Amino acid sequence: MPQTERESMRVLWIVLFAALSMMPLGVWQVARQPSNAVEVVTAFMEALQDKDLDRAYEFVGTAIPTGPAAAFLRPEAIGEWELLAVEQPESLAGFPEPVTVTIGTEEGTAQGSFGVDEYDGEFTLQDPFQTVTITASSYLSVQVNDLTVPMQVETTWSAWQNRQAQRTLTLLPGVYRFFGGEQVALLGDNDGGAGATIGTPLPSGVEAASLQAAVNEYVDSCVEYRLIAPTGCPFATDGQIDTAEQVRVYDPQDVTWTVERYPTAAVAPGVGLYDEPILQVEFTDPGLITLQGTANVGYDGREPFTAACRFDGRPLVVVIAPDGTIELAPLGEVVTDSCRGTE
């Protein structure tokens, strides 16, 4: 080939390469877009494996959850699993069959299926998000794989517990551990998918010293109230009191509570309002708290009194804060009297 012709070809290749390098990336992106239902599901699952949620959402044809509903749609919540198979059975009725996906971990395999829509040659998944319900628990947060999200504490503990009973999470397909428990596969419309209910474990290894410190702090906050029955507190009187002199008095007023000896705290497994497992506080030593004020003594009018009262642990339940520390919640049985029959 003459030199001039070789130079011409060289220039042609340079021009062609330059033109290709200047071609918009969108052209290459279109070429890589899935061309059938199996490919779009495969691309979606591979993006989840890579924890690339923006990429995964490109293949979803329905609305993407936002705000509080998306609290667990984050890379930290996605566990580790392998994509083993993506298949679409042949249609016998003339309608597209859902695409079947199989994933696996060292603990086993799981299978589910996804519906796929096609419009003008573009394939997208039909709502692949998974919904689970977390039962009421002893935790002030929810742990999903490596992500822990604090749960809002309402203005009252009873409202918080009502919220606990209806706690619903939206997740991506995959394998999850809730509160570090057993693996749960959430994949399409399989048995562990939409509508699954996840039980929560009891907190383990509650340290005695931490529990006692939490009880003492809780008691200290309660004695600040100059009420005969402070709400949620482990002591109370119903208005009939046996004084230190073993005299029955009535209708106490201007009362003051004083801690003489803190109760000794322990925990015991129990059942909460929604049949959820709880750690109930019990006092192995009821401690001693005095109540002073004025009260009616028979027909002799009002007189000052001092009464020895005990603590009652039944109102208190152990809950675990997001940072792992122990807190106490007044979700148990209400104390109505701890000031009669105490010396």
Image (spheres, helix red, strand yellow):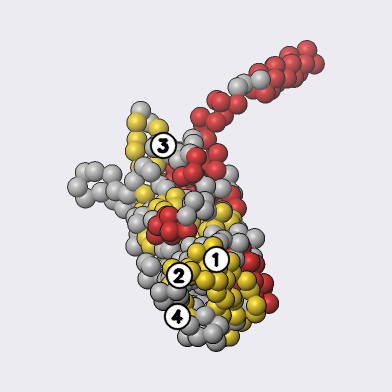
Label 1 or label 4, whichever lies nearer to me, is 4
Instruction: Tell me the kind of residue under disc 3.
Output: Ala
Q: Position of residue 45 (x, y in %)?
A: 49, 49
Classify 153 as above or below 211: above
In the picture, the disc for residue 58 is: none
Q: Earlier in the sequence, mark 1 or mark 2?
A: 1
- Mark 1 falls on what kind of element? strand
Q: Earlier in the sequence, mark 1 or mark 4?
A: 4
Label 4 or label 3, whichever lies nearer to me, is 4
Front position in the image: 49 or 197: 197
Q: Earlier in the sequence, mark 1 or mark 3?
A: 3
Label 1 or label 3, whichever lies nearer to me, is 1
Label 3 or label 2, whichever lies nearer to me, is 2
According to the picture, the residue beneath numbered tag 2 turns out to be: 301
Residue at the spot x=34%, y=31% of the render?
A: 119
Q: Position of residue 106 (x, y in %)?
A: 54, 70
According to the picture, the residue beneath numbered tag 3 turns out to be: 63
In the picture, the disc for residue 255 is: 1
Q: Residues within 10 Å of mark 3 (few under 14, many from 20)?
A: few
Q: CA distance from mark 4 to mark 2?
A: 13 Å
In the picture, the disc for residue 248 is: 4
